[in-house]
Image (cartoon, rainbow, N blue to C red):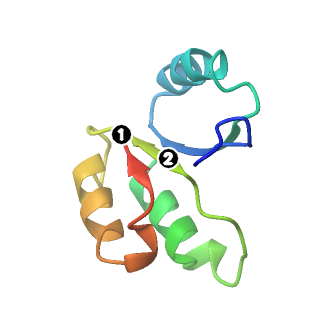
């Protein structure tokens, strides 16, 4: 993320659509070229990032930033973070 004029890929995980909209609006002013990837629960983001389940065999560029809701059903943001940090390819991703 050396040049913020480039497209910043932001993955947001929040079970509340209103919170997702609020976060997007807040960041969009500073980074209008941002690319957004949205999920509503922890299992979806783990499948996406680890290319499992419905995302098996898919190809995508990893996000620069992952914004996690802490309080989600089934898997909390802490659970997702713990699972992702077990994989070295996530070391260069910023988490919020």
- Which element type, helix, strand or loop, lies under badge 1? loop
| Vertical placement of residue 43 versus 68, above or below | below
- Rendered-image quadrant of the C terminus: top left
**Going 24% across and 58% down the picture, which residue do you hit?**
79
Q: Is 27 displayed left or right of 28 in the figure?
A: left
Residue that mark 1 sits on: 96
Label 1 close to label 2 by CB (< 8 Å): yes
- Residue closer to the observer: 65 or 4: 4
Confirm whether residue 38 shows in the render: no
Q: Where's residue 15, x and y in %?
A: 44, 36
Residue 75 in the figure: left or right of residue 37: left
Q: Residue furthest bottom?
A: 57
Above or below, 84 relative to 29: below
- Could you say whether the residue bearing mark 2 is in a helix, strand or loop? strand
- Residue 52 appears in the rendering: yes
Pinpoint residue 71: horizontal percent, then vertical percent. Answer: 26, 37
| Disc ID at residue 65 | 2
Seen from the viewer's position, the closer of residues 90 and 18 is: 90
Count of numbered circles on the image: 2
Disc with the residue nearer the chain's start (1 vs 2):
2
Dividing the picture into quarters, in which one does residue 24 lie? top right
Decide: few, some or many residues near mark 2? Use Cα within 10 Å; few <14, some 14-19, many ≥20: some
């Amino acid at each position: 993320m050396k040049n913020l004029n480039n497209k910043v890929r932001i993955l947001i995980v929040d079970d509340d659509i209103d919170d997702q909209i609020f976060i997007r609006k807040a960041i969009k002013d500073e980074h209008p070229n941002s690319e957004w990837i949205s999920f509503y629960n922890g299992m979806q983001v783990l499948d996406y990032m680890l290319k499992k389940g419905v995302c098996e065999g898919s190809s995508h560029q990893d996000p620069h930033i992952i914004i996690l809701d802490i309080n989600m059903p089934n898997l909390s943001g802490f659970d997702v973070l713990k699972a992702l940090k077990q994989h070295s390819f996530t070391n260069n991703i910023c988490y919020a």
